[in-house]
Amino acid sequence: MEQLTLTEKYSKERYRKFVETILDNKNAALWPDVARYVARLPEIRAGQPQKVMLVAKWSDIVRQEDGTFTRALWDEHVFYSYDVKPEDLQ
Amino acid sequence: MTGKSFVEAWNEFFFAEQSPIPIALFRILYGMAVLATLWLSREDWIAWYGPHAWVSLSTMQAFEPGPRLNLFTVMPASVFWVQMLFWVFVASTVCLTIGFLTRLNSVVVYVCLASIQQRNLFILHGGDTFLRVAGFFLIFSAAGAALSVDRLIRIWRGKEGVEIRPRRPWAQRMIQFELSLVYFVGFCWKVAGAMWVQGTALSYIYRLDELQRFPLPSWFLNETLMKLATWFTLVLEFALGVLIWIREIRYYLLAIGLVFHLSIEYSMNIPMFQWDVLTAYVLFIDAADLERVWNWISNHVRPFPGERMTVIYDGGSERLRRVANLLGALDIFGRLRITDARDLGTPSGVDAKAARNEIVVVTNSGARQGLEGMRRVAGVVPLMWPVFVALSIRRLRAS
């Protein structure tokens, strides 16, 4: 979202909301659908994908003792891995 | 309060007839909010709702089992049908906004809105839910009773006069309740969270890069101001949820709420939420006050579209009376003085026989009848400008 223009950010906000949803483990049933959708994206499908990995990236906002806030370093982990089947790309 | 007076107060609140102008104005704003929502997501209709969407229909049904109001479950799963659904949705929303076949279109808009929300619940915000619930009550309201094409048609058919008939406001009251619940529930959720009570919540929120919109001055982000802003949010949400029902302070609260939402619209990227909620503010304004505001606007606008005109019609003619009523309803800026010829007599220079069959328009340059008279009238009534353009083109071709 941070890389989009103001106009794009306004019209694509639902993607931020959706990402917020799929990062929640209780919505794990959504992950296969998301992975299949990614595999079917034209630029990815063209490369015959074998595996799709969903990666969470985050950086904590840390409150300092003096009341100011700083950003912690970025962290990431793969929270889901999906083996693409031929029928997924049909 | 005795049982009897409670029942009386209840009936007065929900069923005492009142002007339908606030709910009609809400219908217009509501339609614009739905249209803007559809416009913003137009590039992603297929990505979110198509046959191979981010979330499949079967997955969504597993999350939300049981019967649901969802057209996607009954229509063919193809891109064509999804696009058809959206274009019907857009067309119906336009009709609802202008108040054409209002009841029917409010049903269609509600069913389409409920369907797309049910198709993917994971991308919704509170504003979307508000629109859906308000859309349900809009079906039962008198939203088409004023400021609508339906009303013009009724006037033309002689079923209604220039005066707008009061209606029962119970559906409007339900939407008002919904708005106050949005705030009150928001308040309840927030006070259950430690960060809101401690006053640090906004400090975190305003540091989430993905939610930022236009920049805020750095002094605004200092700890003390952020704490005050956090607690002010709690107080305001409580006030808009509960105290808004107190007539004496209502307008102050609405004004503060308006500034509050506009400041969020400026600083945070939460598309349409503020506008969705603000649409319902108009329901809390008395029709008499809306009329006062409108009179103030029209007094300032009135001098601009040209000279005021007198329209004379023969009140003995049912057809001419309807035309005069129609002109009266279209003349929202009070550009016309509409007079029954029986009260005034036929003005000089006008064929008295013709005046019994046509309206007569008296301008500074003399009286006009027929299409030329109508063209002159259309020129000074903004809602009739398309007619003015059409009649002017016709006149040019004829000359």
Image: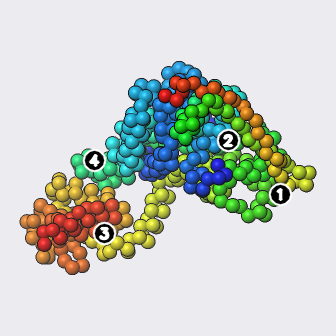
Question: Residue B335, relative to residue A85: is it above or below?
Answer: below
| Location of mark 3 (residue) | B380
- Cα distance, mark 1 to mark 3? 55 Å
Question: Residue B365, relative to residue B286: is it above or below?
Answer: below
| Residue type indicated by callout 1 | Thr
| Residue type indicated by callout 4 | Arg
| Residue type indicated by callout 2 | Gly
| Location of mark 2 (residue) | B186
Q: Work out whether mark 4 precedes mark 1 in sequence or the reverse, and give the earlier one.
A: 4
How far across and how far down the image is residue A80, in percent?
Answer: 69, 29
Callout 4 touching callout 3 (CB < 8 Å): no
Callout 4 touching callout 1 (CB < 8 Å): no
How far across and how far down the image is residue B28, in percent?
Answer: 44, 50
Q: Which mark is residue B154?
A: 4
Q: Is residue B365 left or right of residue A26?
A: left
- Cα distance, mark 4 to mark 2? 42 Å
- Of residues B242 and B260, the one nearer the viewer is B260
Q: Badge 2 local density, few (<14 within 10 Å), some, or many (20+)? A: some
Question: Residue B72, relative to residue B272: is it above or below?
Answer: above
- Of residues A22 and B36, the one nearer the viewer is A22
Q: Which chain contains the residue that carries disc 4?
A: B
